[in-house]
Image (tube, helix red, strand yellow):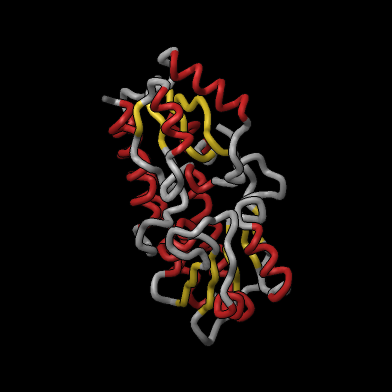
Amino acid sequence: MRVLPILIAMLPSLAWSEPLRIVTDIPPIHSLVSRVMGDRGQIDVMLDASADPHHFQLRPSQSRAISRADVVIWVGEEMTPWFARAKDAIAADVPSLTFTEADVEDPHVWLNIDHAAQMVAEIADTLAGLDAEGAAYYRENAGVAAKELAELTARVSETLTGIEDAPFVVGHDAYDYFTDQFGLNLVGSLTDIHDSPASVQHISDLVRLAESGDVKCVFPEGGESLSLANVLVDAGALLGDPLDPEGVFLTPGPELYDDLVTNLAKSLSNCLSG
């Protein structure tokens, strides 16, 4: 299993007199921060429901929220370049916690549940560094979250039992962390890491795999056109449920992360176990 380093700004320990104001980029990060923060502060997520996490335009009110934040917690520039540009322009001095290095091959690190547990610990350390009075509270919440994430791993593993060898294609190249953790047989994607269409040659190769029975299911991305997925369906693959790796179709909050991963596992199982 590949593990990317988690980068964290070194922050001074301060006793905070007002609730912390935290800004996050996408719903899964907002969800993990919410589990650690509890009711000790305000957490905003910038990505709107059903919006494209790679190509998003901030509203003026969201830019103001970033500029006023006590800390911004986000995946990193490779995942949300619009967030990086906004922070550099209007909040360069605001402390920042990110979870990927620049130029990483795949920024979807939260889809590995073990990584999510590491992220929760880093979030607790960051908040404790800003709010010394709440340090024990944050770390207690992080400990609870880590146990719950371990239980989530067990449930997901059970859901995926028996489909490890079934070959499948996804709409967006976002799932390597998930498939590596659970040993699944992902054979390709219809768009790349940045949501750009795959090459004609790549699609032709996937069609040949489907025609030979080596693609059991194709899973489109939620909200995206089915045109490329239907090419593989016409070649013999089954059409699976749309996937939502960024949780943009879910209700934001502490439970979103578990819902996101659980829905992903169930969608894969429903088609691949048939």
Q: For this rendering, which residue is in front, 23 or 129? A: 23
Q: For this rendering, which residue is in front, 46 or 199? A: 199
Determine the image quadrant of residue 68.
bottom right
At a point 52% along the width and 67% down the height, the residue shown is 46
Whether 205 is drawn above or below 84: the answer is: above
Q: For this rendering, which residue is in front, 266 or 129? A: 266
Whether 205 is drawn above or below 194: the answer is: above
Q: Is residue 108 left or right of residue 170?
A: right
Whether 11 is drawn above or below 179: the answer is: below
Report the residue that reaches farthest toward the bottom.
Answer: 17
Percent x, y of residue 209: 48, 17
Q: Tell me if I can see residue 251 in this picture.
A: yes
Quarter in which the C terminus is drawn = top left
At a point 57% along the width and 81% down the height, the residue shown is 15
Whether 86 is drawn above or below 147: the answer is: below
Determine the image quadrant of residue 248.
bottom left
Q: Is residue 242 left or right of residue 27?
A: left
Report the residue that reaches farthest toward the top.
Answer: 212
Q: Is residue 9 left or right of residue 227?
A: right
Percent x, y of residue 84: 67, 62
Tell how many labels: 0
At a point 38% along the width and 44% down the height, the residue shown is 150
Q: For this rendering, which residue is in front, 25 or 229? A: 229
Percent x, y of residue 148: 35, 50
Q: Tell me if I can see residue 166 in this picture.
A: no
Percent x, y of residue 53: 54, 56
At a point 55% along the width and 32% down the height, the residue shown is 1
